[in-house]
Amino acid sequence: MSEQATLFIVPTPIGNLSDITERGLEILRSVDLIAAEDTRHTGKLLSHYQIKTKTFALHDHNEQQKAEYLVSKLQSGISIALVSDAGTPLISDPGYHLVNTCRAHGVKVVPLPGPCAAVTAMSGSGLPSDRFSFEGFLPSKEKARNDKITELKEETRTMIFYESPRRLQYTLDALTAIMGPEREVCVAREITKAFESITTMPVGELAAWVAEDSNRSRGEIVLLVAGYKPTGLEIPAKILNTLKLLNEELPLKKAAALTAEIHGCKKNALYKWGLENFN
């Protein structure tokens, strides 16, 4: 296709087919090959836009084995578009091994902006969006899931998860028990689709609300959890650890300011704690 063949990372709609960009369509039409998570699923999108480009299956079960093969194709001058079933590739979807292999071999990688369920849900949730962390899927096993939620209990950023309909109620109940019923949580369902809903309330109330109607846990789900907010001088252990480490090298006032910037909390509370607890 060109002297320097390229791997294009092309986001695809998460529900509404109109959400693909003009540039994305242009790339899908012009490349030599489309590496798709599910060729049948992608085929529906291509058929809708009358795109005839050949597809190649690249999914979780074969990506590590096929990455070198696709890179050899790229090195021979064939340009490839990488797509997932919905949204931006690599965001809880296949693609990491291919992109990493391309980088290792000096193959040009061009990512396109476009649909992403996590960011779309974040923008409409009503939860703080200045700082957030994407956590992907929680573990499916109860103990591992509870351990992970406990680990994140004092995370001060808004947390974004993907969750399956059959596990949503268990997760909301675990969040209620571990993080407390007052923690603000948002369930964003079927984003961009006909039955889209975005519901934000204290997780204790939200868990009960979802339990009232099975329709409230159907479809593709993004779960957003508000960050931990210390009350008074109650400061999470991980923040205090940062303060202690920085205070070993810096004056307390500077250490408190940097810790506050890193964790998004109030520097005055940290400075006061340091005065009371550091020798």
Image: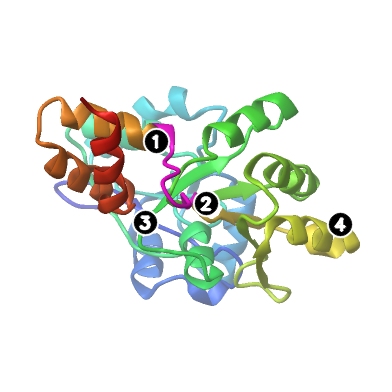
Residue at 10% in and 33% down: 250
Residue 131's disc is 3
Residue 143 shows in the view: yes
Residue at which label 1 appears: 96
Residue at which label 4 appears: 211
Q: Secondary structure at mark 4?
A: helix
**The magenta stretch spans residue 233:** yes
> Which quadrant, please, contains the C terminus?
top left
Residue at which label 2 appears: 160
Whole-percent x, y for residue 10 in the image: 39, 57
Q: Earlier in the sequence, mark 3 or mark 1?
A: 1
Q: Earlier in the sequence, mark 1 or mark 4?
A: 1
Q: Amino acid at mark 2?
A: Ile
Nearest the eye: 173 or 37? 173
Q: Nearer the viewer, mark 2 or mark 1?
A: 2
Asked whether disc 2 touches disc 4, contact meaning CB atoms under 8 Å apart, the reply is no
Q: Amino acid at mark 4?
A: Ala
Question: 59 left or right of 179?
Answer: left
Whole-percent x, y for residue 40 in the image: 64, 51
Asked whether disc 2 touches disc 1, contact meaning CB atoms under 8 Å apart, the reply is no
Residue at 15% in and 38% down: 252
Disc 2/disc 1 C-alpha distance (Å): 20 Å
Residue 92 shows in the view: no
Q: Earlier in the sequence, mark 2 or mark 1?
A: 1
Q: Nearer the viewer, mark 1 or mark 4?
A: 4
Disc 3/disc 1 C-alpha distance (Å): 24 Å
Q: Amino acid at mark 1?
A: Tyr
Q: Which residues are magenta?
A: 228-237
Disc 2/disc 3 C-alpha distance (Å): 11 Å
Q: Secondary structure at mark 1?
A: helix
